[in-house]
Amino acid sequence: MSGGGRTGPDHRPVGAAGATAAVLFIALFRLRSLGPLDFWAWLVLNTMILVALSFVFDSAYGQRLKEDLRSALLRKVSIGIASAAVLYGVFALGRIAALHIFPFAESGIGNVYALKAGVPALRIMVLIVVIIGPGEELFWRGFFQERAGATTSRAFGLALTGLLYTAVHLASGNLMLVLAAAVCGAFWGWIYLRFRSPVLNIVSHTVWDLAVLVIFPF
């Protein structure tokens, strides 16, 4: 008999982080506000909680980020911006197709943009740049996909992250938002699988969010 030592990778941090993300984001998309917190404030709070958990569960994460920032930063920023432009183009074409295929597409897209109603554009921009864009990639790809891949396989980590990222959006009841999350999750998951750079993903996610939600909305 063995002495009771650990015989394999520890799946508990990934499981705990995934469960926490599911609870936080399902509640957000179902309720959309919490006491004095509107949707955007609650989204920021959830993102900060998950980023904090990422660093608690992975003590080496900070060092990985430092190394990522020190290596070919200009190249990563350039690829991040270019990938955001590609994803924006995908959504532009997808919107045209969806409006022809789905009778509910226009209202679904409108409901997404309704989340901005009455919220100053500057506030949304600041939150996207400072917290939402960076934070979502730090958690979903830099931590969750990385750790899920490390405890199983890179392909499984990509699939699991994309599935959970899409699934939490189901609580919104908006099929267009769910489809958008599926496309984004697969795209940014593949980008991370290809480059293994949280910084690159942060640039891509942040630039895309700014374009779609503030600068060039559909």
Image (cartoon, grey):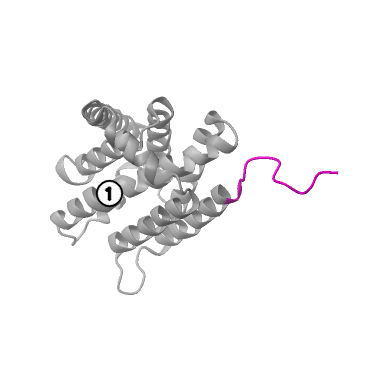
Number of disc labels: 1
Residue 105, located in which quarter of the rendered image? Answer: top left
- Between 48 and 36, the residue placed more toward the observer is 48
Helix, strand or loop: magenta stretch: loop
Q: Which residue is label 1 attached to? A: 110
Q: What residue is drawn where x is 36% and y is 43%? A: 137
Residue at disc 1, secondary structure: helix
Q: Is residue 123 above or below residue 155?
A: below
Which image quadrant: the C terminus? top left
Q: What residue is drawn where x is 23% and y is 29%? A: 85
Residue 172, located in which quarter of the rendered image? Answer: bottom left
Q: What residue is drawn where x is 47% and y is 50%? A: 168
Span shown in magenta: 1-12
Instruction: Classify 10 Å Cα crowding around label 1: few (below 14), some (14-19), many (20 and above).
Output: few
Q: Is residue 17 magenta?
A: no
Q: Which residue type carries mark 1?
A: Gly
- Between 201 and 36, the residue placed more toward the observer is 201
**Percent of width and height locating residue 51:** 39, 53
Which image quadrant: the N terminus? top right
